[in-house]
Amino acid sequence: MIKDRGCIVGITGNSGCGQSTAASFVAEHCAGVCSLDTIGHRLLNKRYVQRDLADGFSNRSMQAMDESEIRSELRSIVFDDPQKMAILNSILHPRMVRWASISAELMKYGKGIKVLEGALIYELKIDRYPDYMIVIEDTAERCAERIAARDDIPVEYALKRWDRQFPIDAKVERADYVVHNTRDMDYMKQQILTIFGDIENRLLI
């Protein structure tokens, strides 16, 4: 039987490493998953965020866009401009941290393992919330190809995302567990399920 308390497991990596896929593999084995990407997408649907983006980028039309349109617009203006990326981060990141901290506080209650998943857990300094941190490791080149195909952006833009995140080696050094996403999905799934089995054993009384 699992102890009568919440356990939070963080799953992170750099963009394209596969942390969202890893979280999906363990979704049925845990009591809930909180995704930073989902938090970010929800924020883009908020009128006050749309207003701040419109003001920050001097683009009033952004107030009339939906979340998918805003994401498309942002991809076209920020990923090749560090100053505009800084504007975006100044608007979204503090709100993501607040939302994630509230979610983490709620996840502490009740039995079972809860997952906090996202590429920016270390960058946003919310790694203090999980009891265990799992880092998904892969190469920048492989991840950039995945991101480019997923988001329909040039590979060089995807590599710039990596340049703006912590080095993957630094994240690996801080991890409690490391998953190597260097082969097929079955290989990654086997690793993440083994890790969750170990965490569950640690929580047994």
Image (tube, helix red, strand yellow):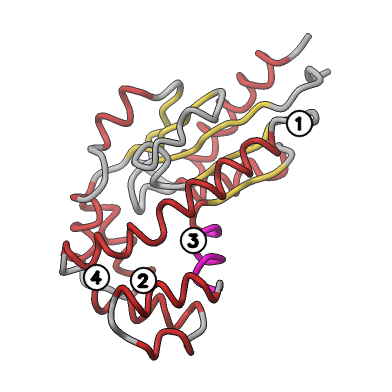
Residue where numbered disc 2 is placed: 151
Q: Which mark is residue 78?
A: 4
Mark 1, secondary structure of its residue: loop
* Image position of 142 with respect to 51: above or below: above
- Residue 144 highlighted magenta (yes or no): no
Badge 3 crowding class, 10 Å Cα cut-off, few under 14, some 14 to 19, many 20 or more, is some
* Image position of 1 with respect to 111: above or below: above
Q: Nearer the viewer, mark 2 or mark 3?
A: 3
Choose top left, top right, bottom left or bottom right for residue 139: top left
Counting the numbered discs, the total is 4
Q: Which mark is residue 40?
A: 3
Mark 4, secondary structure of its residue: helix
Where is residue 37 drawn, in percent x and y?
49, 57
Q: Nearer the viewer, residue 129 or 141?
A: 129
**Residue drawn at (41%, 59%) of the image:** 92
Name which residue type carries label 4. Answer: Val
> If you read the primary sequence from the N terminus, does the residue marked by circle 4 or circle 1 appear first?
4
> If you read the primary sequence from the N terminus, does the residue marked by circle 4 or circle 2 appear first?
4
Q: Which mark is residue 135?
A: none
Region rendered in magenta: 38-45
Name which residue type carries label 3. Answer: Gly
Q: Nearer the viewer, mark 4 or mark 2?
A: 4
Residue where numbered disc 1 is placed: 109
Where is residue 163 drawn, in percent x and y?
18, 50
Mainly helix, strand or loop, the magenta region? helix
> If you read the primary sequence from the N terminus, does the residue marked by circle 1 or circle 3 appear first?
3
**Residue drawn at (71%, 37%) of the image:** 29
- Residue 40 highlighted magenta (yes or no): yes
Name which residue type carries label 2. Answer: Asp
Name which residue type carries label 1. Answer: Tyr
